[in-house]
Structure formats: C-alpha cells, structure tokens
Image (cartoon, grey):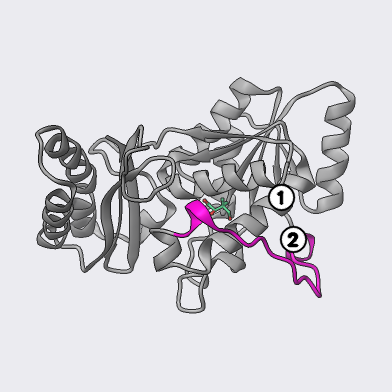
Amino acid sequence: MQKLKSLPELQKFVKEQRGLGKSISFVPTMGALHEGHLELARVGLQKTDICIPYIFINPKQFAPTEDLASYPKTLEEDLQKLSSVNVNAVYLPRMEDVYPDGFVTSVKLGGVALPLEGEHRPHFFEGVATVVAKMLLQCMPDIALFGEKDYQQLMVIKKMVNDLNIPVEIMGVPTVRDFQGLALSSRNAYLNNDELGIARQINKLLSRMGQELRGGASIAEIESRAHKSLLDAGFDKVDYITIRDAQTLLPPDKNTTSLRALMAAWLGKARLIDNIPI
Ligand code: PAF
C-alpha cells in the first residue's frame, strides 16, 4: 500500500494508474477507521481496479463548540487496517493540500441539506461538501463510496455532484452494524459500557417505527413515542427521531415513494445518528 503524503504524490499515482488503464475508486474518511470504512474499501476494490481511501480530519465541518480537538486520531491502526484489506494506496493530504493559505471558497447548499442535520448543525454540510468536492477534483476517481449510516450526507453529496457536473459516480454502501445492531461509528469510541448498552437500542427503536407505521399508527404518534423511548432508554437529548421521504428528507407527502426513519441524539459526549429504510 503506497502512502501518498501530498497532492502532487496523489496526482502522480493517479496519472500512472490511468496510464495503465486502471479504474479508480475513492473512499473519503476522517480516519478512526472501523469495519464500516473497510467495507467501503472492499466494495471499492470489487468495483474498480484500484481503491484509494483518504484520511483527512476536515476542520471546516466542525463548529467551534464541537469535537474537532478530541476527534479520535488512530493513524497507525488505520494504516494497518487499510493494508489488511489490500487497498492500493492511501492519500494523507497535508492541510495546505486541502486549504492553502487564502482559501475562501465553499460550496453553498440547499434542498436536501436543509432539514435534520442542516437544522441542528448548520455549518456541517457546507464543510463536508467543500472538502468532498475538492477531494473528488484532486483525485478524479470513477467512483466514490459513502456509508448509508450518514444517509443525509450521501444524499447531499449525490446532489452536489449532479448539480456541479463532477464526473464521479457516488455509491452508497449499507450501514455496517455490530452484533447487536449498533451502527459502527468513529464516535462510538466516546461511549462507556453502559452507554454502549443504551446506544444498542437505537436500531430496534427505528425498526419499531416501521412496524408501527405498517400497523396503521400516525407518523406524529410514532415520532412522539420514539422520542420518549430514547429519553427513557437513557439518552440525554434527542435532536430528532423522525420518518421522512427518503429522497427529500422532508415529511412525506403525496409524491413520496419511499420512507426512511432517521435519528440523532446525544448520549454522554457522543452525538449518535442512525437511519433505516422503512
Ligand atoms: O463521513 C465522514 O467521515 C466525513 O464527513 C467525510 C465524508 C470524510 C468528509 O470529511
């Protein structure tokens, strides 16, 4: 596995591989890698000849009050994990490769970026979209892979790539869960054992929302029961737990063809998000 430690090194590697006729997949990450990330890399390797994950903790997607300083940093373990799934190279950009002095440009979003995370973390998607747009343009892969665990992020990136004609296919990969259904997340590292037990109830609660809907309950009733269940389970604060149109992430209407249950809630130091199709 080659370590590409700067933008020129990435571009040299990509040029060589393109010269050999290789197709390329790209896996954006902020490190603290878990099975979910490795699954993205495995799918990438199935779809293309070469897979390049990148690791870059993007300061622009953290608000000043958020966990940028304490975000888990596990570079040595990350490199071992990536090498164990046989990716061809990993891109480790320097800050100046991404945000050189004087950098002022950002991607302004609307639509699917506005509800849910957009309401609770208003800075977030602009930071994500800006870094992902930059990274895609730096690498110009055929495919970039994102986990469905961050479902709204996946939808935002698909829309951005479409709107800006960035010639990359954005591929969503189903959420990887632990043996009790907890969605794998780098922020699970913040949870103690008791909190892990509480967090493991999320998936059951989301599934129950689907069952209740199929049983004829109203969305308002289901959402308010689910909200209370999260608090009863031990969550400190619920940002949202809701049933939305899977395309717009707005409340379902007559044009809705598929639904998604999504949640975000605080447990100790961790803000956990999850979602399932229902
Ligand atoms: O999902 C993440 O880890 C980040 O938001 C991403 C896509 C790597 C952009 O920094």
Residue ID for mark 1:
135
User: In terms of secondary structure, where does tag 1 sit?
Assistant: helix
Any mark on residue 71, and which?
none
Q: Does any portion of residue 6 appear in the rendered image?
A: yes
Q: Name the residue: 73% across, 42% down.
A: 166
Part of the protein shown in magenta: 94-114
Instruction: Tell me: residue 274, above or below residue 224.
Output: above
Viewer-closest of 173 and 252: 252
Residue corresponding to mark 2: 98
Q: In the picture provided, is 163 more to the left or to the right than 68?
A: right
Q: Residue type at mark 1: give it.
A: Met
Q: Main secondary structure of the magenta part?
A: loop
Identify which amino acid the numbered label 2 is placed on. Val
Using the rendered view, name the quadrant where residue 99 is placed. Answer: bottom right
CB contact under 8 Å: marks 1 and 2: yes
Residue 93 placement, left or right of 211: right
Query: Residue 219 placed where, x, y %?
Result: 18, 47
Residue count near mark 1 (Cα–Cα under 10 Å), binned few <14, some 14–19, many ≥20? many
Q: Nearer the viewer, residue 215 or 264?
A: 215
> For residue 103: magenta?
yes
Under circle 2, the secondary element is helix
Is residue 5 part of the magenta span, yes or no?
no
